[in-house]
Image (tube, rainbow, N blue to C red):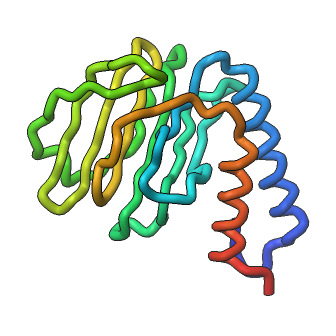
């Protein structure tokens, strides 16, 4: 979306339309999307989302930098949809690590999950809540494994806009 020579007004309109579609699917989903309760790294911004036939399938929040080798945390909440077998990407380094059983605080309830840690400081957390799933991944300290529902997209969308504007300034 940030190619040279692109019609900036058209790109801006498409981006705003995608945010409106996301807001509508978020409001109508009836299922929670989780964020870190007390993140050790800021800002928290919308990283990506997937909507299938108007239904929110997944939403990823990024805490901290989007640069892979810098400290960051990504939290993805996704749900199983009929005919879909979606699983978000995760760091390949972790496929060879043994899982640790952990308990994660999700909205005040202790839920079992699995945690993979790599000596390089990369980690991956997965929690399954029936047809709803939470995947946390990052580089750097784990921090507190405590999550709460995201109630409003406005702040994470605004943080994304700020980040993108800093990366791709208007000429």
**60 vs 41, nearest the viewer:** 41
99 displayed left or right of 145 = left
4 displayed left or right of 13 = left
Count up the numbered dots. Answer: 0
Residue 148 appears at what percent x and percent y?
52, 30
Q: Dividing the picture into quarters, in which one does residue 119 lie? A: bottom left
Q: Dividing the picture into quarters, in which one does residue 128 lie? A: top left
Residue drawn at (78%, 54%) of the image? 15
Residue 161 appears at what percent x and percent y?
72, 61
Which residue of the protein is positioned furthest toward the right in this rendering?
Answer: 9
Which residue of the protein is positioned furthest toward the bottom in this rendering?
Answer: 171
- In this rendering, the answer to whether 36 lies above or below 102 is below
8 displayed left or right of 133 = right
Question: In the picture, which quadrant includes the N terminus?
Answer: bottom right
Residue 66 appears at what percent x and percent y?
48, 64
Residue drawn at (87%, 62%) of the image? 10
- In this rendering, the answer to whether 115 lies above or below 128 is below
Question: In the picture, which quadrant includes the C terminus?
Answer: bottom right
Q: Dividing the picture into quarters, in which one does residue 6 lie? A: bottom right
23 displayed left or right of 159 = right
Residue drawn at (47%, 65%) of the image? 65
Residue 59 appears at what percent x and percent y?
56, 38
Residue drawn at (32%, 28%) of the image? 104
**83 vs 107, nearest the viewer:** 107
- In this rendering, the answer to whether 162 lies above or below 34 is below
């Amino acid at each position: 979306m940030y190619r040279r020579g692109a019609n900036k007004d058209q790109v801006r309109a498409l981006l705003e339309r995608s945010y409106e579609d996301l807001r509508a699917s978020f409001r109508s989903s009836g299922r929670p999307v989780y964020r870190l309760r007390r993140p050790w790294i800021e800002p928290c911004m919308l990283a990506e989302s997937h909507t299938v036939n108007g239904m929110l399938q997944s939403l990823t929040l990024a805490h901290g930098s989007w640069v892979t080798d810098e400290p960051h945390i990504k939290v993805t909440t996704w749900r199983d949809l009929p005919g879909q077998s979606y699983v978000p990407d995760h760091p390949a380094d972790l496929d060879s690590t043994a899982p640790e059983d952990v308990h994660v605080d999700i909205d005040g309830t202790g839920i079992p999950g699995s945690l993979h840690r790599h000596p390089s400081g990369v980690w991956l957390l997965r929690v399954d809540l029936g047809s709803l799933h939470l995947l946390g991944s990052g580089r750097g300290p784990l921090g507190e494994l405590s999550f709460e529902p995201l109630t409003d997209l406005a702040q994470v969308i605004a943080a994304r806009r700020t980040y993108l504007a800093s990366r791709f300034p208007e000429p």
